[in-house]
Amino acid sequence: MRWLRPLVYVWVFPGTAVGLFGTALALVSGGKARVVDGVIEAHGGWITSRLIQGNRWVGPISAITLGHVVLGCDEATLARTRLHERVHVRQYERWGPFFIPAYLAASAWVGWRGYHAYLDNPFEVEAYAIDDTRQVEPD
């Protein structure tokens, strides 16, 4: 079934295209990128500052997966979150162009039901079950 692998990359490409744009922004602003196990990992530059800003729902972001691209704050963060983010890569491979709408709909649904829109999102629950990177360093 190796011949199906290129089709998976096509199926996931809408998300990957967004990730490639982020990778380009990282590279032109002093960041770096490399391929690890068939996934582009980019960090630094504009991407780091944007991830650190985060969003109002989860605050600062360590890393984010967009198709076959993972954008992270730095190399250490990419290494620390690799297992978690690879779960999201596999989710993209299952859902293809429907991943982002499904993820957002799941967040809205659990938020509407009174749960945490990020931590209780089934996509995140699956990823954290594999690798719980939420652990806080002791003071």
Image (tube, rainbow, N blue to C red):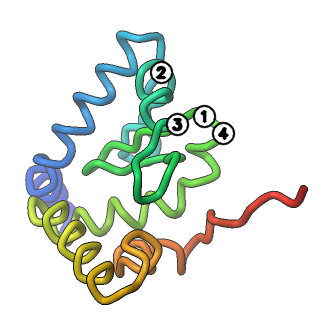
Query: How far across and how far down the image is residue 36, in percent?
Result: 46, 42
Q: As shown in the figure, which amino acid type bears the numbered disc 2?
A: Lys
Q: Which residue is mark 1?
A: 75
Quadrant of the image for the C terminus?
bottom right
Compute the Cα span from label 1 to label 3: 14 Å
Nearest to the eye among marks 3 and 4: give it. 3
State the residue in front, 124 or 69: 124
Q: Secondary structure at mark 3?
A: helix
- Residue at 52% from the left image edge and 36% from the top image edge: 52
Taking depth in this image into account, of 91 and 72 the one nearest to the observer is 72
Q: Which residue, given by chain and number where applicable, does mark 4 sit on?
A: 76
Above or below, 83 relative to 53 = below
Mark 1 surroundings: few (<14), some (14-19) or many (≥20) residues within 10 A: some
Kindly identify the residue that appears in the image at 87 percent across and 60 percent down. Answer: 138
Q: Is residue 136 above or below residue 111?
A: above
Q: Which mark is residue 32?
A: 2
Pointer 2 or 4: first along the chain? 2
Left or right position of 37 against 74: left
Q: CA distance from mark 2 to mark 4?
A: 13 Å
Pointers 2 and 1 in contact (C-beta within 8 Å): yes
Callout 4–callout 1 Cβ contact below 8 Å: yes
In percent of width and height, residue 66 lies at 28, 48
Give the CA separation, mark 3 to mark 4. 15 Å
